[in-house]
Image (cartoon, rainbow, N blue to C red):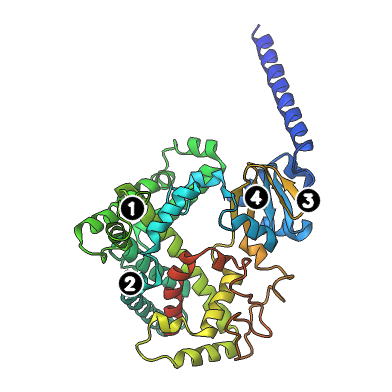
Amino acid sequence: MALLNASTLWWALGLVSLAWLLRETYRGLNSPIRRIPGPVYTLFTRLPLKYHTLTGHRLHFIHALHSRYGSIVRISPFEVAVADPESFSAIHRIGSGFVKSPWYDTIPDGIFAMRDPKVHAQRRKLFARAFSATALRSNWEGVVRDKVERAVERIQSEAMAFGEVDVMKWWTLMATDIIGQLSFGESFEMLEVGRKTEYTDALESALINSSVQTELPLLHTLVSCLPIAGIKKSITANEYLYSYGSRAVANLRNQSGNAANLFGTMLATLDGDFSAEKDSKVQPLTDHQVQVEAGNLILAGSDTTAVTLTYLVWAVLKQPDLQRRLEEEVANLPELFDDAALEKLQLLDAVINETLRLYGAAPGGLPRSVPKGGVTLSGYYIPEDFVVETQAYTLHRNAGIFPDPLKYASFATDVFNVSHLTTTDCSFINSTNPVFLIRKSGPKHRKVFTPRSEQGLAFV
């Protein structure tokens, strides 16, 4: 009887598996996106994409598919990647109807993850004053300058002592100290101790934990039960980050004016221009939201700035003539130059933009859900609720847009067209062109990244 029961169980399991296989095969063969170019297996499974995501090669995997199949490619049974300027503009323009995909539900519900356009617009309005050029310069330019000077001092000291220096380390410590001061109202003081803090270690662990939880939820649940210290540390990283975020709240509540941190400027905004009588839709941040947004700012403003600065220094040092002309441009600045003066340096701005084009720190996909009624992109119809994504890595290497796209521009002429910021030999594109994703993404890159990067380069 036991043998019969076991045999029956195996038969039942086999029939269920066969039924599932037939269903998936039928669904794949009749998929509404089956005519979109792409590997045949992407009609039936997402596993290859998941593998490359977990191993950190997703953008290279998708870029290779674009190289083989063209500007539009099917990457999974319900996801399509597009890499042409027209499609990018159609997806990301204001009011397009494309909202962030359900993937964003897996990360903390701050301004970067909000899927509801109306809610996001309200939060963005709340952030707008704090992140304006005027507010950043008046409240934080001194902080940025002090940290940049200290970072350059540490770089010079280490180079003189050892003959070489890890600039990536010092740019990371500098950027994190700055964004920590802005977010929490206190610096991590990592430039002083010369290493990362427990908070930044927890942040990195939380990122790994989030990736595994998103791509392998069942495995994440099982592994989280194991009594292994390293795993427990990763699992509890979010709790530590949330607890540390209370410092941002405490500094906000205990200090007057808007000097405590960026969130103080937001409070001042609510008390002034956006009072309840004038705009009842704009609500102040709760303590929990301050904690979440503070962590988001650390994540968005530390490694990204450091990685891009490192690539920029490396790219410029590889071209001695470009280095010379950049140094000459900066040398014409007054001794007590400020960010407004740096913003007028055309070669410096062009070098920053070329670095962001070729070596930007966030070149991966931006997944968006197709709106009701579906959409036609690159001549192919994609139904509603499917996911489309664009990635800067591929768009910024489009030979039809950028001449010799894999080559870092030499900017061999000193004559610049101010309206387009291009040179006769460079691969930099008009900064107003929607395909240049860093510019298109809005003020959070320009106003947060630039003061630190420009001052860092000027001092170097």
Q: Amino acid at mark 3?
A: Pro
Q: Earlier in the sequence, mark 2 or mark 3?
A: 3
Amino acid type for the residue under numbered disc 2? Trp
The quarter of the picture where the C terminus appears is bottom left
Residue with the mark numbered 4: 388
Residue 21 vs residue 403, the one in the foreground: 403
Q: Is residue 201 visible?
A: no
Q: Earlier in the sequence, mark 4 or mark 2?
A: 2
Camera-near label (4 vs 3) is 4
Look at mark 3 in the image and give the residue it sits on: 37
Name the amino acid type tagged 4. Val
> 261 left or right of 106?
left
Tell me if mark 3 has few (under 14), some (14-19) or many (20+) residues whose alpha carbon lies within 10 angstroms of its own: many
Q: Which mark is residue 140?
A: 2
Asked whether the residues under the numbered discs 4 and 3 touch, taking CB atoms below 8 Å apart as contact, a structural biologist would say no
Pointer 2 local density, CA inside 10 Å: few below 14, some 14–19, many at least 20:
some
For the residues marked 4 and 3, what is the alpha-carbon distance in whole angstroms?
14 Å
Classify mark 2: helix, strand or loop. helix
Quadrant for residue 193, please give it. Answer: bottom left
Looking at the rendered structure, the secondary structure element under dot 3 is loop
